[in-house]
Image: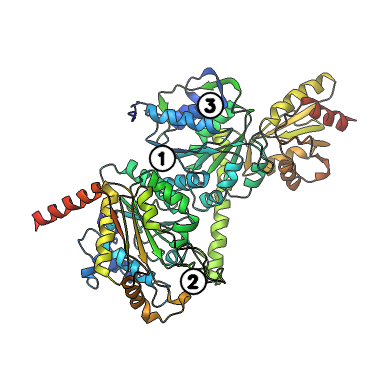
């Protein structure tokens, strides 16, 4: 977009909300800002209703600050905790129905490619483990088989948190949650491997306990999707509300689970995607 | 093997010229081919297909149009829910879309139809009606139309391949009116219309409709080129307070109101919502789809026996032509409603709007793939004439 389209018409400054004025004057559109500059610019997410200590809320804030091109990005969400904090996001975003996000994103991405052949319009799917790993898995995988050029980001809180803490396919085996009264009877879905086998040229898991790493992975996943093919990022988002731990312990938990390998971090990259990232790095080195 | 897409040149013309003035030529084609001929002239950007009998041929012919350069993009989706979701995404991204399904495919995708209407998407979709499970049948049956009546989408019912051609092409211009901006389903009876040949009058194929302008939409297109940027399609209105309930309620009312506002555009482009003949007769037949053709035949035989029967062809089910039906029903002594389904949803619709619904005869009804013998309609006519 051109930043002109969000400029406030003269005379209307006072009646436009403070939040929107901030966005126009100090927002990240068209600027090279990232998580290192958090606190110096108006963030894309305003106040949201997610719980204290929510791993998803922090991850989302970090993702939104890491988008390579927020002024030309459209987000597709799906039902779940994450969708409750999308009305507050200052990027066009779509909520359709539960689980259809990757099919919808396919149509959207192709439409934007038709209408803006000279521009890179990034489409980013952001949904929970229920939307991506369970109810929408067929449509998610088919978008990967087809090689659709957008990024799928999963907020993995290992449960259906918004409906009150039920077992999901991404819950760990043995965990007792609603609808798993005797403990979950099968292992956590191997989504990064599924993504890799289904045609994602880049698949990675990460936690918000390492913000810089998260920012780097999100950014490169979006850049690779733009040029090479589908990408997948899975973010571990501990849920204090349903897993019953103190809200101050979320990051500690993420750190510990990463360390003892109960939430293993993985990264797959295709040779073509690797070459593309290296060429980007070379270009950055040349300019600096 | 990768085959390169061809390039085709077509001239953009006024919809009125394409619909009413351009010289038409007769071609002997199937209903599926009529769908392809409509899309050829509709300036569609993206079509998405998924096979299901009896629809498959129409969407594979649309795929051939893509190869010839009439469409900018086309693919076969993963299932009907995926396809209906993807056309929603494309429509929100600001392009003109087309898809088609039928029977079990309609039900597989069902959650998307009220979602299209609620999101005010001008999607045009063809439905080739067939029975739904269980037991499984691929044969013609219009029961899915009864399920679709309350989804908020505009519904046309084609009797012939000619209707199918005209209704699909005109649907884009009606659906995309800023004061309507709703999805339109063009329904036709599977096999009877899709797989049979008839003479269809077609305008030249080197002209097409003007493109869709997404910035005329009453809701913002999702392209980050239009303010406000803090914009969710479509936001949740489910907080437990009165303002949320009122907001949701008024949104639903507005979707229905948009359907009502479509009447004037339908009148302009399709003619009236109904067509009628001898509407002053004591005995009337009210029907839609191919039941109309069978009724015409029965009426012609009855007239030779000295029984005068009027015919009302209902072309539009949503918005329902209740004023027209109510007016014409007033003088009739008997109203026969032949249908291709077990529930008799059309008889129910008619009964719900006329003053004396005891004169509605909800028969004959055939279903599960049966044809509708003219004799069955004649029996009802003779009984009513006694």
Helix, strand or loop under label 1: loop
Task: Answer with the quarter of the image where residue A158 lies.
Answer: bottom left
Of B352 and A186, nearer the camera is: A186
Q: Same chain for labels 3 and 2? Say yes or no.
A: no
Of B69 and A168, nearer the camera is: A168
Crowd class of label 1 (few under 14; some 14 to 19; many from 20; radius 10 Å)? many
Quadrant where the C terminus of chain A is found in the figure: bottom left
- The x and y percentages for residue B60 are 48, 31
Disc sitting over residue B34 in the figure:
3
- The x and y percentages for residue A113 are 32, 43
Identified at 77% across, 31% down, the residue is: B280
The chain carrying label 2 is: A
Q: Same chain for labels 3 and 1? Say yes or no.
A: yes
The chain carrying label 3 is: B
Q: CA distance from mark 2 to mark 1?
A: 52 Å
Crowd class of label 2 (few under 14; some 14 to 19; many from 20; radius 10 Å)? some
Identify the residue position indicated by label 2 in the image.
A175
- The x and y percentages for residue B297 are 74, 23
Identified at 83% across, 40% down, the residue is: B359
Identify the residue position indicated by label 1 in the image.
B212
Point out the frontmost of discs 3 and 1.
3
Q: CA distance from mark 3 to mark 2?
A: 57 Å
């Amino acid at each position: 977009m051109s930043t002109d389209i969000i400029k406030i018409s003269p005379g209307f400054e006072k009646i436009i909300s403070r939040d929107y004025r901030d966005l126009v004057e100090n927002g990240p559109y068209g600027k090279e800002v990232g998580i290192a500059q958090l606190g110096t610019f108006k963030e894309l997410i305003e106040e949201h209703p997610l719980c204290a200590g929510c791993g998803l809320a922090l991850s989302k804030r970090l993702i939104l600050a890491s988008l390579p091109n927020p002024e030309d990005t459209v987000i597709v969400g799906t039902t779940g905790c994450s969708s409750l904090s999308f009305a507050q996001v200052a990027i066009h975003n779509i909520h359709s129905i539960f689980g259809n996000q990757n099919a919808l994103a396919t149509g959207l991405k192709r439409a934007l490619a038709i209408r803006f052949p000279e521009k890179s319009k990034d489409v980013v799917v952001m949904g929970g483990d229920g939307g991506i790993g369970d109810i929408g898995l067929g449509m998610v995988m088919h978008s990967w088989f087809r090689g659709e050029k957008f990024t799928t980001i999963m907020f993995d809180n290992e449960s259906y948190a918004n409906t009150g803490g039920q077992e999901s396919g991404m819950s760990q085996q043995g965990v007792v949650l609603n609808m798993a009264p005797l403990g979950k009877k099968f292992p956590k879905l191997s989504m990064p491997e599924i993504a890799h086998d289904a045609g994602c040229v880049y698949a990675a898991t990460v936690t918000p306990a390492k913000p810089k790493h998260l920012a780097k992975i999100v950014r490169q996943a979006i850049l690779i999707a733009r040029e090479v093919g589908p990408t997948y990022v899975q973010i571990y988002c501990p849920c204090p509300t349903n897993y019953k731990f103190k809200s101050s312990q979320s990051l500690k938990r993420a750190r510990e689970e990463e360390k003892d390998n109960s939430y293993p971090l993985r990264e797959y990259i295709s040779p073509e995607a690797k070459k593309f990232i290296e060429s980007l790095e070379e270009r950055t080195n040349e300019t600096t | 093997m990768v085959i390169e897409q061809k390039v085709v040149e077509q001239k953009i013309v006024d919809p009125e010229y394409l619909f009413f003035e351009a010289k038409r030529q007769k071609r002997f084609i199937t209903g599926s081919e009529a769908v392809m001929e409509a899309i050829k002239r509709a300036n569609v950007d993206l079509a998405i297909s998924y096979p299901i009998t009896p629809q498959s041929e129409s969407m594979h012919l649309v795929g051939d149009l893509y190869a010839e350069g009439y469409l900018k993009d086309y693919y076969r989706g993963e299932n009907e829910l995926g396809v209906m979701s993807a056309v929603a995404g494309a429509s929100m991204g600001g392009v003109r879309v087309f898809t088609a399904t039928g029977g079990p495919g309609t039900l597989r995708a069902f959650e998307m139809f009220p979602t299209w209407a609620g999101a005010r998407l001008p999607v045009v979709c063809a439905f080739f009606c067939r029975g739904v499970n269980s037991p499984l049948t691929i044969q013609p049956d219009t029961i899915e139309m009864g399920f679709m009546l309350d989804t908020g989408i505009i519904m046309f019912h084609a009797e012939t391949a000619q209707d199918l051609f005209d209704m699909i092409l005109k649907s884009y211009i009606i659906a995309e009116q800023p004061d309507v901006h709703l999805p339109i389903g063009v329904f036709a009876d599977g096999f009877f219309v899709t797989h049979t040949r008839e003479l269809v009058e077609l305008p030249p194929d080197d002209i097409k409709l003007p493109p869709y302008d997404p910035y005329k939409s009453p809701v913002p297109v999702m392209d980050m080129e239009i303010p406000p940027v803090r914009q969710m399609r479509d936001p949740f209105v489910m907080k437990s307070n009165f303002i949320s309930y009122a907001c949701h309620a008024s949104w639903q009312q507005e979707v229905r109101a948009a359907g009502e506002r479509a009447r004037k555009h339908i009148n302009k482009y399709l003619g009236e919502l109904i067509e009628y003949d001898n509407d002053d007769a004591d005995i009337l037949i009210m029907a839609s789809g191919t039941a109309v053709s069978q009724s015409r035949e029965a009426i012609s035989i009855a007239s030779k026996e000295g029984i005068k029967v009027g015919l009302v062809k209902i072309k539009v089910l949503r918005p329902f032509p209740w004023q027209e039906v109510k007016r014409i029903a007033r003088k009739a002594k008997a109203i026969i409603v032949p249908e291709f389904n077990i529930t008799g949803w059309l008889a129910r619709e008619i009964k719900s709007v006329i003053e004396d619904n005891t004169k509605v005869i909800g028969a004959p009804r055939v279903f599960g793939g049966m044809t509708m013998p003219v004799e069955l309609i004649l029996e009802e006519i003779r009984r009513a004439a006694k």
